[in-house]
Amino acid sequence: MYDIPASLIAALLLVVVLAVLELAFRIGRRTQAASTEDSKGHINAIQASTLGILALILAFTFSLSLQRFETRSDAVVDEANAIGTAYLRAQLLPASLREDVRRLLREYVDLRVRAGTVTTNDEDGRTPLLAKATGVQDSLWEYARRSAEIEPNPVTSGLFIQSLNELIDSFGRRDAAINRHVPEVVLFLLIGTFVLTAAIVGFGAGVVGQRPSWVTFAMVALIVGLVFVILDLDRPLRGLIVISEKSLLDLQASTRAPSSHVRIPAAAASMPAGASAPTR
């Protein structure tokens, strides 16, 4: 289901629900003559129960998709902060390594920005970017190792190694968050409950001999819209609702600016007491 566009799923769902509503209405009209007041009351009770269950599943599924969307958004900010911290603390490295490390970090930012523009179902485009980013991480770690050998000082090499660890961890957290979706079984349960509810509503209308009013169709359209939003939130790099890459884009612009204008996230400035901050 994840590979199918959310708009197509919503359109098909709308057609199916309307068809089920009409079919159930016609079946209900055929049984109208044999229906009693007790049976009609029973149908109304079942109808109210299924509507309540549908509302519960809708709220649960929407909450799941929204939580995942917020987690992905936070992961982008955290990764930008981690890269910014490493970029700032690279100024503490020995002069022979400093510029090479900053060049690699600028390349790494570019790779992470590009990865944010490739949809998660485009494996051919996404996998090489992730592999290149991992390769840059390995190169940065090698520079950190060499720095520790040249100048084994916890206030210089140690701080950079700490920020590099956070950079690597934030990469894993963001990639995991992007690939974490609402379980398909929950989506199938939502769709199945919606179709079943439509069938019961249509059948109940047929039993009482009245076609579903415009209120019923408005409710159907609203629920289809909610399903579309749930699916769109669950597809972080495509659709109408996408994750903002502003944090990474701002960092990319800052690292390309003259050194006197480099703007690093505030989290990057956190250093132990007694350690002098490098000049920006």
Image (cartoon, rainbow, N blue to C red):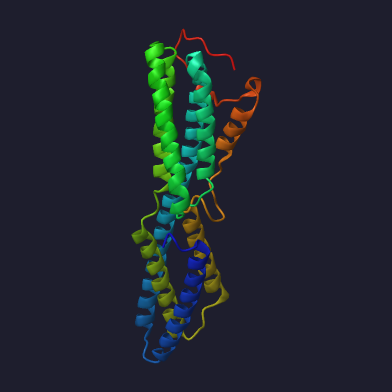
Looking at the rendered image, the quarter that the N terminus falls into is bottom left
Examine the image and state in which quarter residue 218 appears: bottom right
Q: Position of residue 92 (x, y in %)?
A: 49, 15
Residue drawn at the location 52% of the way across and 25% of the way down: 102
Q: Position of residue 9 (x, y in %)?
A: 48, 67
Taking the image as shown, residue 111 lies to the left or right of residue 24, namely right
* Nearer to me, 40 or 46: 46
Quick one: which residue is furthest to the front in this view?
Answer: 96
Looking at the rendered image, the quarter that the C terminus falls into is top right
Reply above or below: 250 against 114: above
Residue 188 makes an appearance in the image: yes
Residue drawn at the location 49% of the way across and 50% of the way down: 236
Q: How many marks?
A: 0
Examine the image and state in which quarter residue 144 appears: top left
Q: Position of residue 83 (x, y in %)?
A: 49, 29
Reply above or below: 189 against 246: below
Residue drawn at the location 46% of the way across and 74% of the way down: 17
* Nearer to me, 167 or 96: 96
Residue drawn at the location 40% of the way across and 48% of the way down: 179
Residue 68 makes an appearance in the image: no
